[in-house]
Amino acid sequence: MSESASTGEASVAIVVVNYNSATFIEAFCDSLKATAFSTWRLVVVDSGSTDGSMATIKAAFGGCASFTGLRCTENIGFAAGVNVPFDHELVDDVDFVLFLNPDTTLEPDFLTNMVAAADERTIVVPKILFAEDHRLVSTHAGGFDWRLGVFRDTFAGHPDGPATNVRRDDLATASFCCALVPRQAFRDAGRLDERFFMYYEETDWIRRAQAGGYRIRYEPSAVIYHRESGSSGGGWMTPFKQYYATRNRIYLVRKHARSRLDYARFTAYFLGTRLITAAKMIVRRDWRLLRAMTKGTVDYYRGRMGRTVQVGDL
């Protein structure tokens, strides 16, 4: 691991927001240490972890001059966690910033292939497969319908195959589970909006970056594996994720709506589909998800943004 650009490679700051990741952080560290790309540094923001996971990270990387660990006294969320290295001017002198979740493991050439596909106006995201089943895609890189606030054509949950092995350019959105972003893009588009706390913050930021002329490229030769919602309870949908995804979806669409009429149409669609979803939750007796979805909706209209609940609260 080196900050030197003597090899001619671009310089990359890898930013990781860690929160109680002890059950999988050792595998993450081992795979990151095996990365073939050489000119990277690691910045880890620990968001109030209480499980010893930050100690594991320090044991793996603490002896490296290009490692910086920053500890927060509480869980500040992904958006604020990502902003911390910029606040401390820790990533000002690199070409790219790589956002990377600690609930991932990585192929050794993933970063080499991402950097090769990048340029000063291109955000690159890899192929993300489920850690539990490498045959399935775990990513929402693709389209986004801003009228309804829904993802389109993302391959999420689909089998990996010929369609997912083709490079795709000019995507509408992608996940910051793993994303290589030109450093200049943050000077142009600004910080992540901390009112989201978690979920949809990258969709909001990408929208702003695209307005400044940046594009998203999906690079299938770069491959990582993801434990879905590893730091928010585990699994495809948890009450924690349901709450913030519900609340923040309304905020996202309202923030970028082109007119009051567009937002009114979205509101009618959103509330109607939430009633249908609630009915299905009642049939399944999934009371925790129902409470989380209801609370997320009510809290948005009450103006309760930022961190309002924690992982164990719902």
Image: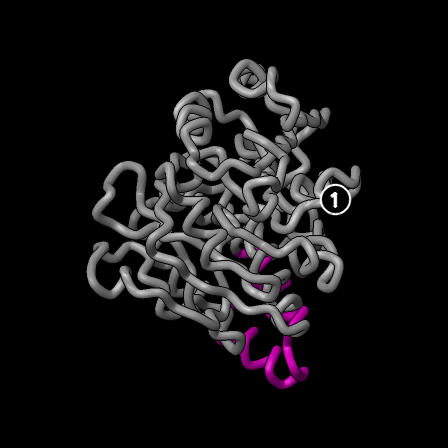
Q: Is the image coloured rainbow, by chain, by secondary structure, or in one colour? A: one colour
Give percent across and percent down for residue 256.
65, 73
Residue 269 position, x and y percent, is 48, 75
Residue found at x 23% / y 55%:
160
Span highlighted in magenta in the image: 246-272
Residue lying at 65% horizontally and 70% vertically, measured from the top left: 254
Q: Amino acid at mark 1?
A: Phe
Q: Is residue 208 above or below residue 263?
A: above
Q: Nearer the viewer, residue 112 or 30?
A: 112
Quick check: 294 above or below 267? Answer: above
| 166 vs 24: above or below | below
Q: Quadrant of residue 18?
A: top right
Q: Secondary structure at mark 1?
A: helix
Frontmost residue, 177 versus 48: 177
Is residue 222 among what the camera can see? yes
Residue 291 visible in the picture:
no
At horizontal 51% and vertical 46% (from top left) the residue drawn is 292
- Depth check: 198 or 96 in front? 96
Q: Quadrant of the N terminus?
A: top right
The residue positioned 71% from the left and 63% from the top of the image is 189
Magenta stretch prevailing secondary structure = helix
Please give the residue where the numbered disc 1 appears in the rendered image. 86
Left or right: residue 166 versus residue 47 is: left
Q: 10 Å neighbourhood of mark 1: few (<14), some, or many (≥20)?
A: some
> Does the stretch in magenta take in 259?
yes
Q: How many marks?
A: 1
Horizontal arrangement in the rendering, residue 183 relative to residue 173 (left or right):
right
Q: Nearer the viewer, residue 237 or 107?
A: 107
Q: Quadrant of residue 258?
A: bottom right
Residue 207 screen position, x and y as percent: 61, 68
Q: Quadrant of residue 247?
A: bottom right
